[in-house]
Amino acid sequence: MKLIDEIDRILPIIVKITARKLSQSTQELSTLNWHKGESNIDVEFSELAKNKCIEAFDEINSNKSLILSIEIPDLLLTFRREDETFLRKIELKSTKSTDRSVPGSMIMSLDPNMWTIFCLRLKNGFEVKYGRYYLGMSRGTHDLFQDRSPRPRLKFDNYQSVDEEPNLIKKTVDESFYKHYAQTAVNRLLNPRTHSWQDNLVKEIIKIVLKKPDVFKDI
């Protein structure tokens, strides 16, 4: 089997086993330092996930000529067999926020099919889920837009249980997020919850359009 095919076959299994091992490591998770100063860099979580990932690989690697090395942060995997080398990445996320989500990456520069492991830090323990990155991408009714590219939040609850088989379906980046953010900008004006400078900007754009609707009819 070609190395790239072998990696594509075993990587989802490695991710699932790694996530399951982390979910069973509540004692180790409870001793981690999740902050360094004011930064939330999760280095110790990355190191623990790296160790569990190596354990997972060793458990399923029937081809002893295949070698795996891992660097952090996140998990940067290098698979080697003889003179062939392939790189893969497992995204690591963690949060203790009450909405069980974290800010995502810019959609213009991400791989939506990247495997992701997400740790939810609760007051009385931890939960771990996993899956392809896009599973967690969420749309709220009052989302703010960003200055460079949409950054959909990642919802912990959208990911797979460690007991579920890996979802192997791949997707491309959904460009309808532009329409989504336009609609949520309007929602923020018509049904306000919190205030942002963006609301003032959208108001002024709407005023200009209403004054000169013919200018915009063909865009």
Image (cartoon, rainbow, N blue to C red):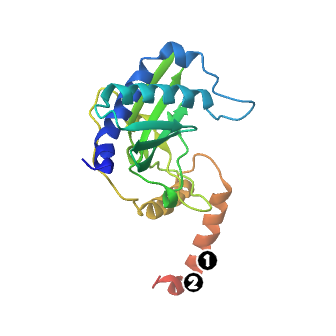
Name which residue type carries label 1: Ile
Secondary structure beneath dot 2 equals loop
Q: For this rendering, which residue is in front, 87 or 81? A: 81
Location of residue 173 with respect to 54 vertically, above or below? below
- Kindly tell me whether residue 47 is visible in this rendering: yes
Residue at 59%, 80% in the rendered image: 211
- Residue bearing the label numbered 2: 212
Q: CA distance from mark 2 to mark 1?
A: 6 Å
Residue at 38%, 24% in the rendered image: 20
Q: Which mark is residue 208?
A: 1
Q: For this rendering, which residue is in front, 76 or 46? A: 76
Residue at 53%, 55% in the rendered image: 106
Residue at 44%, 30% in the rendered image: 53
Q: Which mark is residue 79?
A: none
Name which residue type carries label 2: Lys
Residue 206 in the image: state x and y as whole percent: 58, 71
Secondary structure beneath dot 1 equals helix
Residue 120 in the image: state x and y as whole percent: 49, 28
Residue 96 in the image: state x and y as whole percent: 56, 28
